[in-house]
Amino acid sequence: MDPVIVAKLEKYYKYRALLFSNRRSLVYAVTDNKTNKTVALKATKHSQEKERDNLLKLQSKHIVGLHRSFALGNVNFLALEYCPRSVRDVIKGDKHVSPAEICFMVNQMAEGLNFLHKKRIVHRDIKPGNMLLSWDGHLKISDLEFAVKLEDIDFNYCQFGTSCYCAPEILLELGYYNTKIDMWALGIIVAMFYTKNEIFESRSREEILEMICKMLGTKRVKSLDVNNEKFANIPEFTKPDWSILDKVPKKALSFIKNLLEPDPKTRWSSEQCLKDDFLTDKRRKNPKFNHIPNKYGTSRNAERQLPGESSSLVWTSAKRFYLRPVLIAELNQLTKRFHAEIESGILAIDVGLSASVSMELPLVNVSTCELRSVIRFFTAKNETAVNINRNLVSVYGE
């Protein structure tokens, strides 16, 4: 980030931690200097006008709150309600989530989607990372960048959302869809509470479509558009294969199957979900919810335990790291073998470009911890151990 922008930003906010990054945006945990409260600050060079307008129109306990929006230079900012965890954190980080807790979270997700759908709004990017948990344990839907009213949909545009949560009508580019694409994504999230992984995990939309055909049966999926050219290389799976969900309880499996209907006409709506026995069981209505704390603490006081300015994570562009030639050579060797490339909003490295040349890699806004995770990406696929501390040197910065 431009030092001039950072200097202006620090008049209003104190940096605490980097919460999230991708190609489009960064999300920081920051302290508002005026109120001394923690907020989530989303920064991007892309327009945030649509997301801002959606948040202003959809103020609700089901939607993450917007404190303010502003721009500094060429960077646009949204100051959002800070939520310590996401559903993804619960799924990936907690070894055991009780049936009561699963029902509690699924019920809240269904209520949030029902709120949007009653207003004729499709979210279009429902996934665990966009389902946030507030301090009191209530779920809030975030990231409304792709949210759109039904009457404003451009059906020629289907390149939105995360592929492994996309419904068949999106993967097949049928030229129509509605709020039921959000319900398909909800079905996958419910399944993930039991599998701990995406049930259709692939970067290729063609492969995901094949996985869906294998689970549901090719004939059922083809019924959407039997002549669609995207079925050309997909085998004829005659029988549905739900084996990946063989450990899911009976009520939960029935609930998931009703959400993973290939035909959006028969796929359950949010209202139907809220009436199902899976969610209406009184014994599961108000569980003791123990997934509120975030990774920095174990209670409401965790907010005070977020890293402060003394942390190794610094958002100014003054910090750089150089990689010694021996480490560059190691990464080059691994890259040639695995053709690996690491990308994120704050870091993009293709070490293959460096060949055998000794070089410097300036990594702006990258902490020692984050850089170690980059190295682990390579070394996890190879027995060769890299001594990070010996080969990584902080040259200058705070």
Image: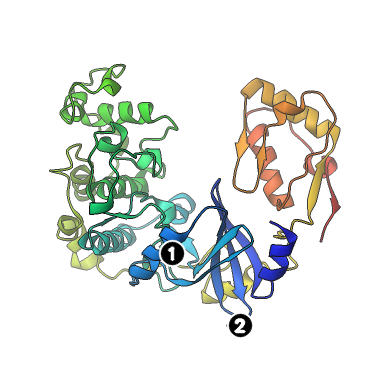
Where is residue 256? Give x, y as percent. 23, 46
**Quarter occupied by the C terminus:** bottom right
Q: Is residue 288 visible?
A: no
Q: Residue at x 27, y 59 (%)?
A: 113
Q: Is residue 64 above or below residue 260?
A: below
- Quarter location, residue 383: top right
Q: Residue at x 35, y 46 (%)?
A: 194
Total labels: the figure holds 2
Q: Which residue is mark 2?
A: 34
What's the distance in space between the residues labelled 1 and 2, CA to CA? 22 Å
The answer to the question of whether label 1 and label 2 lie on touching residues, with beta carbons closer than 8 A, is no
Of the numbered discs 1 and 2, the one sitting upstream in the chain is 2
Q: Amino acid at mark 2?
A: Lys
Is 382 on the left-hand or right-hand side of 26? Answer: right
Is 300 on the left-hand or right-hand side of 53? Answer: right
Q: Indicate which label's residue lies in the foreground, 1 or 2.
A: 1
Residue found at the far bottom of this picture = 35
Relative to the observer, which residue lies in front, 106 or 225? 225
Q: Which residue is mark 1?
A: 52
Relative to the observer, which residue lies in front, 261 or 173? 173
Label 2 environment density (alpha carbons within 10 Å; few <14, some 14–19, many ≥20): few
Query: Which secondary structure lies at badge 2?
Result: loop
Relative to the observer, which residue lies in front, 276 or 260? 260
Q: Is residue 99 visible?
A: yes
Q: Residue at x 38, y 31 (%)?
A: 205
Relative to the observer, which residue lies in front, 154 or 98? 154
Q: Amino acid at mark 1?
A: Arg
Is 38 on the left-hand or right-hand side of 182? Answer: right
In the drawing, what numbered circle is on residue 352?
none
Is 86 on the left-hand or right-hand side of 333? Answer: left
